Amino acid sequence: MTGKYMTSESNLPEKPEGEEIQLQVSDERTKEIFNIRARVGRDPDELSDPDRLTVVKGPHENTEEEWYIDVLETDPDDGIDRELLEATMASMEDKSTVINTRSKEVKTLLRYLTETDEFESVSEASRTIMLEYLSDNYADLVEEYIDLKVQSERSELADELYDYK
Amino acid sequence: MTAGSLRQYLQTLETRKDLHRISEPVSWNLEASAVTMLANTEDSRIPLFEDVDGARLVGDPYRGSQRRPWDRIALGLGLPSDLSYEEYYEMVIERLNDPKPPTTVGTEDAPCKDVVETGDDVDLLDFPWPYIHAGDGGRYSNLHTLIAPDLDSEWVDWSYHRSMIHDGETASVLLLAGEQTPNLYYYKYEQHDEPMPVAIAIGVEPAVQYTSVMWIPTGRNEAEFAGGLKGEPIELVECETNDLRVPATAELVIEGEIVPNERRDEGPFGDYFGYVHGPRRSMPLLRVTGITHQQDPIIPFCVEGTGVGYTENTTSSMEVGCVGPDATLGLRTAGFDVECCAPWKSTPRTVYTIATPSNDDGYLHELANFIFTTWGMLHVDFFIFVDADVDPLDQRQVLEALALHADPDEDFHQFGVETMPKVPLNIYQTPTEKGDVQTGTSKAKTAKAYIDATSDGDGTRDDDVEIEYRAQEILESAGVDPEKLPFVDPGEGGR
């Protein structure tokens, strides 16, 4: 085993053992703090390439437990390709905003929701439901998109003000 | 002569044989702080670590002695070394009363621009930030000046908020709402979803370091008061990646922005009360955009927690030597008749003593009300009012005043029970009562209190003073060094 990591019990999910998790750890030698994708457990035999992981516990973090960790990825980041997202935004500027999808089931269900006044139209229903789904399941992507959008609107406004001046 | 840079101050210490150069390699990982802690405990020379991963650290450079906490601070201001606390306070107040606006110099005249790193070259981990206490959540920069602008005015606040280094580009900053810079972040920038541009100037000249911990009123620039303390304008230089100006003689400057709605772990940290006390907090994230520094920079740090009891460190000494005179001036400026406002030396920041000639109940209440409602009272829990002839820095005298004059029935007053903000670094709240992610303050509120330990005219010490003076004369004639005796003013009865 090489290297040693440290984390707080408060960083671990409720039942972390054996599961693939994202975890904030610090490198015990450099004290650098970073996020990794990993599997953790109390038994090193349950892991394929275990490093030592010290878990500090208690309200003042003054109790230590020795755990083990399989580091799967050291820089998982949020996986968002910012450049690609920016390029996609740019390419959508002058394109149609219509989304085509062929599905009798989806259309039937959406139509039902409009008939029952849940939504005013099929397009409103599909827009709302998709955005909700994206927010729940691709939160990082949505957040990054919002950041880029705000940034782009701010620079457009700045350009307009500059031109006006 | 007032020291114009940290280096100049350290040279002055060396001239006085008060600097301990340590040329052997020392680790930033607990070793530098352990040596500094020992120096603090032994009231020894200031340790300068010359080889910490090829860089330099200095441990608690402004630490004074428990008897005279202000001595090295006075040295940084070029004040005489034998001042009594009254003389020292009045000289600092005199300088603060004469603020001087800063000047701006070009990059070529700014030592902090010897090396400029921006973009991909930025790496916080190139520097030996100390890991100070076993159990800390990370490495810290904890003796610096945080520079942040107001969103709506020209005001730029200088303050002092420790930062925990996370990686090469980010750190978390301890911002507790109720203080000036945190209020700018939580109630202005974050409300507008805007990043707050900041610079952290490390290893600044003494006058800048001192004003960073003072209670300068909101809207007033610390830079001007630093100029007053120094006796000449502070030289500032523009940052590389934002519009802020920073002290040109700083050893190192971290430029960046504290981003809205992002939090990172901060702590645990061995705090000024002398305990590592959890839980870890969620604090705003600093994203670094540039680093500039002098060649071979010297990074100062403080071993927090060693400033309680009989030992001093930089922050405990600055509380007495910087915040005390500044608070005294603040109260006088507000129109109160105050002889001196000074912290409790053995646990600074929690208790302050105010010596005042007034013992009028209404007047003291008004004074307390002014303090609790106009100052950022996160750290200070209570005040003790004593007579003007009581030395607030002499805890024995203060305790005597408490024992003799504070009537438990009439003289203990609480303010805003369970409504006042409280710093979540205290040790009397449970972990669950702490840690409001939104503003960094405690979830549970507390009370503030003051104790009226003034004499209410219930006795006079005139006879005692006369007796004490005569006793000192006898001791002097018996060969006791008069310098070691407390000052006694015999008044008109003395010879």
Image (cartoon, grey):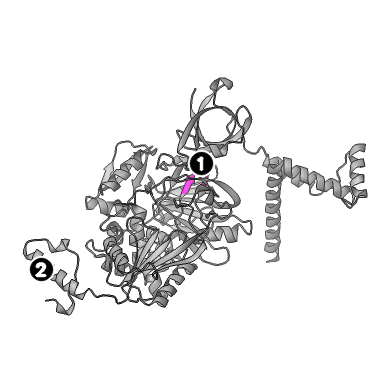
> Hey, what amino acid is under mark 2?
Glu
The quadrant of the image that shows the N terminus of chain B is bottom left
- Give the side of residue B262 with respect to residue B236, left or right: right
- Give the side of residue A122 with respect to residue B164, left or right: right
Category of crowding for the residue at label 2, using alpha-carbon neighbours closer than 10 angstroms: few (below 14), some (14–19), many (at least 20)? some
Please state the extent of the stretch shown in magenta in the rendering. Answer: B163-171
> Hey, what amino acid is under mark 1?
Gly
Category of crowding for the residue at label 1, using alpha-carbon neighbours closer than 10 angstroms: few (below 14), some (14–19), many (at least 20)? some
The quadrant holding residue B490 is bottom left
- First in sequence: mark 2 vs mark 1: 1
Q: Please state the horizontal and vertical placement of residue A72, each as a whole percent of the image.
A: 60, 28
Q: Please state the horizontal and vertical placement of residue B179, each as a whole percent of the image.
A: 49, 60
Asked if the stretch drawn in magenta spans residue B185, the answer is no
The quadrant holding residue B184 is bottom right
The quadrant of the image that shows the C terminus of chain B is bottom left
Q: Residue at x 41, y 59 (%)?
A: B213
Q: Do tag 2 and tag 1 residues touch (Cβ < 8 Å)? A: no
The answer to whether B129 is drawn above or below residue B308 in the figure is: above
Mark 2 falls on what kind of element?
A: helix
The residue tagged 2 is B473
Does the image show residue A87? Answer: no
The residue tagged 1 is B168
Chain of the residue that carries numbered disc 2 in the rendered image? B
- Give the side of residue B107 with respect to residue B71, left or right: right
